[in-house]
Amino acid sequence: MSFGKVLPTKINLISLRRNLRTIRTIRRLLENKREVLLLYLRASAKEYEKYYNIISEEMKKVYESSLSASVQEGLIRIKEITSSVNRELKVNISTRIAFGVKVPTISVYPETIAKPTFTLFETSPYLDETYIKMKELNAKFIKNSLESEATLKSLIRELRRTQRLINSLDYFILPWYNQSIKFIRIVLEDRQREEFQRLKFIRKVLERRRASGI
């Protein structure tokens, strides 16, 4: 698209100015959206960091109890027990709208959570403690950490898309409109000066004719 191809007419000038006002309004709205996304992104990042720290601390406790269970039961016995545990976990993923952005919500199907294949009387109490803690931790990890991470990615994608739109307006669309308006205005002003000079010349010719009695 080249501003030189625009027909230099008053109608086009009026139309371009009207469109330019609309585009500037759109840009302001995009700037507002970008600011809101940045605020929401910072809040989501803090939330993700909070959940990450909580889960990390709980994972340390799970590791300690599982290590104690391995010491009491032995690695071979632990492998026998864990080999019979269901390794599939089904989750439900849906979406919600946050500030015009689709963000995921994740929930676990309770029936898919692995059931223990051992009892407290048969194994180390640390193994039972590990199972209980890990069961709670899985739900927290999927619901909070993974959901927060997916929300961050969605917000970042939307922020990048919004920034690309703003850049397109700043570096292509707005300059094109400004240059086109300037081009038409210059052409119309030149035409107006030419018309003024032409009318001035005609008036002088008419005045000379009246003065000479022609």
Image: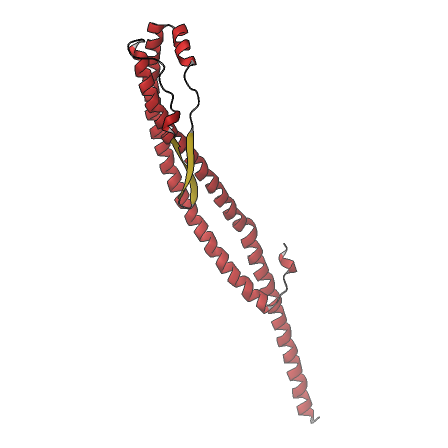
* Residue at x-position 33% and y-position 29%: 50
Q: Can you name the residue that lies furthest to the right here?
A: 214
The percent position of residue 193, horizontal first and vertical second, equals 61, 72
Q: How is the image coloured?
A: secondary structure
- The correct choice, above or below, for 208 with respect to 133 in the image is below
Residue 178 shown left or right of residue 94 in the figure: right
The percent position of residue 36, horizontal first and vertical second, equals 39, 45
Nearer to us in this view, 102 or 115: 115
Nearer to us in this view, 28 or 207: 28
Tell me the quadrant of the picture where the C terminus can be found: bottom right
Tell me the quadrant of the picture where the N terminus can be found: bottom right
Residue 121 shown left or right of residue 37 in the figure: left
- The correct choice, above or below, for 124 with respect to 186 in the image is above
- The correct choice, above or below, for 208 with respect to 150 in the image is below
- The correct choice, above or below, for 147 with respect to 33 in the image is above
The percent position of residue 60, horizontal first and vertical second, equals 34, 18
The percent position of residue 31, horizontal first and vertical second, equals 44, 49
Nearer to us in this view, 198 or 38: 38
* Residue at x-position 57% and y-position 50%: 172
* Residue at x-position 68% and y-position 84%: 205
Residue 135 shown left or right of residue 212 in the figure: left
Q: Is residue 148 visible?
A: no
* Residue at x-position 31% and y-position 19%: 132
Q: Can you name the residue that lies furthest to the bottom here?
A: 213
Q: Is residue 130 visible?
A: yes
Nearer to us in this view, 142 or 192: 142
